[in-house]
Structures are given as C-alpha cells and as structure tokens.
Image (tube, grey):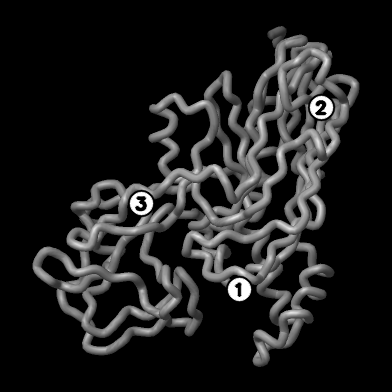
Amino acid sequence: MNQRKLFISLFTGVIALASISFSFSLAWYATSSRLNVDALEITVKGSPEIKISTKTDADSFVERLEKDKLDQVGLFAPCSTMFESRWHTQNALAPEFYEYSGFFTPASGEPYAPNKVSQGLYSQSLYLKANDDVYASIDPLTTFFDANEEENLRYASLIQNQHPDMTPEEIAENLNKLVNALRVSFYVVEDGTYTIFDPHKNGITYYGGILDNDKDGYFDTYYDYDSVLKEVVYGEIHNRDAIVHKADALADDEEPVDGVYNSFSANHGKGVRPYDEAASLANGMEIAEEQSLTYADFNGNRPEDNGWVVTLERNVPKEVVVSIYLEGWDHNCINSTMGASFLAEIQFKILREV
C-alpha cells in the first residue's frame, strides 16, 4: 500500500441498532437462561468509496444492506470472550464466546471448562471492499451505545408491581446500566486480529472470581478432598494451584459491605473458608484481563492513532466479523438490568491516501 499522506474521508459505513429490547420474564443472569430480544434492526450503509456485503459474490456488494439481508439474533444472554488465547491457537475462523460460569468439580472446586456458545449474541460476517487502497477504522465521534431512557422508564412503570419498594425512576435507573455491559468486537479473519471495543469502560474487567450463581444470597461453595467447605473460583484463572482460601471458616455470615446483592456481591457463608483474592494474587495466581479499547483509543487521522485499523486493498473483499454481546464478567451484567433497552450506532471512518 502506498504510504503517502492520509486523511479521514466521509463515513464509510453505519451499523445501526434501534430499540433492542430484552424480556423480563426469564430469570437470573448467572444461569444458562436466555433473554428474548423483542426487536433487533440492523442496517449497514456505505459511501461510494466502499462497498459492504454479507457474502463474497461480486454482485452482492452494495452501499446499503437492508436488515433482511443480515442474520438476526433471537436470543441474548451474557457470555464472555475469555480464553481468547485458546481459540487463537486453534486457528478459529471467528471469535469463540464462552459461558462465563458453569458447573465445577466438587472435590477440587475447579470449574469445568465453560461451554462455547454460538447463540445469545449478535455476530455477523461483513465483507468490506473499496475501490482504492484504504485504511478504515471506527469513528468515536458518531459511534455510541446509549441507554434508551424513554423506553426503559416506560417499561419500569409496567413492572413496578414486581418491585413495590421502588419508584419507576429507580427501576429505570437500574435498567439504564445494562448498556455498560455491552461490547462490540471486530475480528479480521485474514489478518487474525481481534479487537474488543468497550464504549463505557470503567477500569479493568477481570475474567474470573467468585459468584452467586443460584441467587441464594451466598457465594457458591464446594467440599474439597478433606471435606473442607470453600468458595468456588470461576473463570480464566492462571495457576489455579496458587488459589488461597482463608485459614479459618467463618463463625457467622459475612454480608456485603455495601449491602448490595447480585451475582458478584453476596454473603460469605458461615462455616465456609472464603476465597482470599489478595493472598492468591501474591501467591502467583493470575486472573485473565479483558483487553479492550475505549473511545480514547480512536482519536486521530493516522492509522497509528487508532486502536483498531483494517487495511483494504483495491477491489479485494476483506472479511470482518462484527459481534455485539453482553460481557458476563462485567459487573453491570446483573439481574436488575434485565428488561432494558438500548440504542447503538457504529460508524466507520476511512483513512486513505490523497
């Protein structure tokens, strides 16, 4: 590719999701239950400089893809992109998503390898083709994932009878937090590059920890080989032999400091030896971290100023797998956000030679 001066062109693509709604009828996030998507509309547009398709047939490349040409997701459920290194070494042709919790071996407390999932998320192969050699990326100025506050407040009024101690405004405030657990990822198949975009990133998301899977108010436990009751540590944990539990079982229940209960915040139970994360980390245990980008990583006119760039050669289609999903290990992915609606739009920008 000619490395002459580059500049940003007009937007080359738009993926728009409108009124994505989740039913409230199904329960607990941490189980395998899935949430119905009531409406999912996706449109992809292109400028005259770039064509987009869901297949490689020459005649299929257009400036605009109608929603009926795109795969539709009928179910939405929390999942995780942990174990990314595993599917890279297996030469996977698309990202592999996993259940973020699951069953565990009673005697050791080590969770079974979570199942791979292909449902419960939106994932679509898009083929990009340009009439020139170009660099493309997303535009942070026009890309957004926002809570649909008007729809969430309407829905909160409908379900207030299920939460008599809360006002519709308080329920809606919880629903509006779902958007913080959303992710969009880009996998360029030919290049083998994978990038996660977290538009509401706030600190590091760790792919591991203790959970209250069954919503009984207590973190999950197991009996080890010596019949000692300990807390289960889920997720992508490196060097599990370094996991440390406190030496003594609790004489009484230990409640969450902030009094908030969800899958990530529960009681440490009486008679249980709690997981000691600080001691485990000091002992050599590692919890895998989500490597995600935020708006600040897309802030310039040059390819090197953007965290994700796809190179397109003239008239050569390139496959990009775009996935939108709920990251189960994000602490906003909890029961109180179920039933929420959100609005999203992804717009691409072009960096090209003059």
Question: Which amino acid lies under the numbered mark 1 shown in the image of this protein?
Answer: Ser
Indicate left or right for 225 with 30 as reference: left
Furthest residue in direction left, as rendered? 226
Please determine whether, in this image, residue 165 is positioned above or below residue 275.
Answer: below
Residue 218 point in image, percent of width and height: 37, 78
Q: Residue at x 65, y 28 (%)?
A: 320
Q: Earlier in the sequence, mark 3 or mark 2?
A: 2
Residue 191 point in image, percent of width and height: 56, 20
Q: Which residue is mark 2?
A: 8
Q: Secondary structure at mark 3?
A: strand
Q: CA distance from mark 3 to mark 2?
A: 39 Å
Q: Which residue is mark 3?
A: 287
Q: Quadrant of residue 142?
A: top right
Q: Residue at x 81, y 38 (%)?
A: 68
The answer to whether the residue labelled 2 contacts the one labelled 1, judged by CB atoms less than 8 Å apart, is no
Q: What quarter of the picture does the C terminus occupy?
A: top right
Q: Residue at x 26, y 73 (%)?
A: 274
Question: Which amino acid lies under the numbered mark 3 shown in the image of this protein?
Answer: Ile
Crowd tier of the residue under label 1, counting other residues whose Cα lies within 10 Å: few below 14, some 14–19, many 20 or above: many
Q: Earlier in the sequence, mark 2 or mark 1?
A: 2
Please determine whether, in this image, residue 58 is positioned above or below residue 65.
Answer: above
Please determine whether, in this image, residue 133 is positioned above or below residue 228.
Answer: above
Q: CA distance from mark 2 to mark 1?
A: 41 Å
Count of numbered badges drawn on the protein: 3
Q: Residue at x 39, y 56 (%)?
A: 208
Q: Secondary structure at mark 1?
A: helix
Q: Earlier in the sequence, mark 3 or mark 1?
A: 3
Crowd tier of the residue under label 2, counting other residues whose Cα lies within 10 Å: few below 14, some 14–19, many 20 or above: some
Q: Which residue is mark 1?
A: 336
Crowd tier of the residue under label 3, counting other residues whose Cα lies within 10 Å: few below 14, some 14–19, many 20 or above: many
